[in-house]
Image (tube, rainbow, N blue to C red):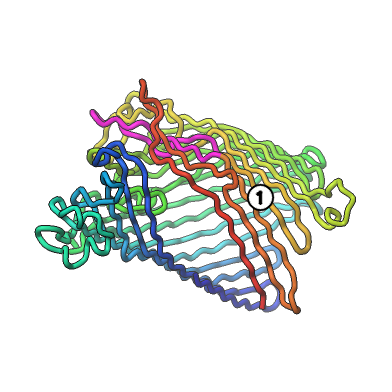
Amino acid sequence: TVNALSSATINWYSGHEVQATVFYVHDTSKEAQIDTGTDFNAQGSSGEIFDESSGWFERGLLFGQLRGEHTFDDLVLSWRGSVAQSTRDAPYERSLRRYINDDGVPAYQVANSYDIRFSDLTDDIKGIGGDAEYTIELSDSREAVLSGGFDVSSTEREYNFYAFRFAGGNSISEDIQIQRPDFLFSPDNIDPQRFVLQEITTPNDSYEGQLDVYAAYVEGDIEWTDFIQSTLGLRYEEAQQTVNTFDRFGNEGAGAVDLENDYLLPSLTFTWNFAEDLQLRLGYSQTIARPQFRELALSNYFDPESERSYRGNNGLVDTELTNYDARLEYYLGPNEFITIAGFYKELENPIEEIQYSTSTFVFETTFINSPKAELFGGEFEYRTLFEFPFDNSFFNDRDGRFSINYTYTSSEVQADENDQVFDPISRSLRDASFFGLDGSDLQGTPENILNAQFGWESDVEQLTLLVGWVDDRILQRGIDLPGAALPDIIEDPGIQLDLVYNRDFEVVGREFTLGLSGRNLLDEAHEEYQISEGELGRTEFNTYDRGQTFSVSLTAKF
């Protein structure tokens, strides 16, 4: 990993500043993985599989920004311009499936089970913007701030994908089947009677995407009295998003995307300090969420983290959200507060992940726009910095820290009788009832989330115990295709318990930092399962032990 940051600032007169910033990061990783387990659809009597995969990944980001701020009494003008390029290069991803034979040895028993992929992605982003802010004194203790601005951005993406497969292998002898991969696919075995390297080309392998956004806003922040304040804003946004697929010969693919929309998005926040330590906030806003390029392109891509194959849906549209929230904040002291909040959201055309079977027990993930969804819930948060109730030198030198946050969410997808959904399989509109959406939870939304931290901090050390719990949630929807019904995939993240410790010390005048950490101390497993009606009940879909991670680091400062 290589990181670099450079910044230069010029100030002149009073309140005039120009700053230039350049940031660069580049990281490279090589990953190798072996998966073993049981698949009821696997070859042989044992049903045991032996999957090997490896990949080389290079990621880079180069970002440059020039910004300025100029103050003229009650008027503040600011401007900015930036360019950035991010890249991802995966030049040699391999995946090989073998089965455990009767002797307990991995063997290449089924043809066409060794794939190689090459891909690269480049994002170029440009943006300019400006803001103006004018302050009006309403009294000695109250003021109104009027502001407005604009923002223009352009994002261009190019994604190239090439795939190959070693075809054949049905008739190789057993002594060759059990050879390790580099011997199995050595030049000696490249022969029409054994293996032939084939390119797998489709018209939708690669894609180009562009998103241009033009936005402007006005806002007023007014203190009506010493304890009542409101902020009213209005944002206009116009955007065009295009995606076009092609193969490596330049032939155009199917499913071109051309989304062009404009929105007028209001927002309102009301704050009432009705007591010295109590504050009530009420909020209303309208926002949007656009589908990502990879969610729109019909290109296939493989996520090495989740080991899932994805394909976009060119029929997706923007998600429109209406948000209402109320928050009561109670400040018990300078380092202690309690917050109680409630929220309600309406979503038009929320984007959800669904999984379908491309062939027998071969799965792919894509996306749909559900007709609409509603969410409501509440949040509780408490945070404090305290002194330990122990009178000894160890605890007297340390401040205790404790925080807890709990969120409850109830979600429901609503699909009326006449609602239709763009089906990514047939690429046509179908009745929403086909997807079984009405009354179900929103994909990716758990009912309960709890996060807590406890520890201490001093001038030279910090210890933090972190606890996180996320309730069961729909990870991906299934499609009820005739003869291939797929129940929803449910994820149970479980309880995450981590411990982090850092200590500063000096040796011969040099500053050092010792770091210790332990992750997943409870050894919780990653669980994904499906629930079927009848005797089958729960079926494990992608469940495995995550294991525990312990690390030690030593940092020297020069």
Main secondary structure of the magenta stretch: strand
Residue 542 percent location from the top left of the image: 40, 41
**Figure quadrant of residue 5:** bottom right
Q: Nearer the viewer, residue 386 or 130?
A: 386
**Figure quadrant of residue 12:** bottom right
Residue 360 percent location from the top left of the image: 23, 38
Residue 328 percent location from the top left of the image: 70, 37
Q: Nearer the viewer, residue 259 or 63?
A: 63
Q: Quadrant of the C terminus?
A: bottom right
Residue extending farthest right: 391
Q: Nearer the viewer, residue 459 or 322?
A: 459
| Residue depicted at x 47% and y 29% | 412
Q: Amino acid at mark 1?
A: Asp
Q: Is residue 357 above or below residue 63?
A: above
Please give left or right for residue 81 compared with residue 414 in the image: right
Residue 2 in magenta stretch: no
Q: Which residue is mark 1?
A: 221
Q: Is residue 91 above or below residue 315?
A: below
Over which residues does the magenta segment extend? 470-494
| Residue depicted at x 51% and y 63% | 129
Q: How packed is label 1: few (under 14 Cα within 10 Å), some, or many (20 or more)?
A: some
| Residue depicted at x 25% and y 55% | 178
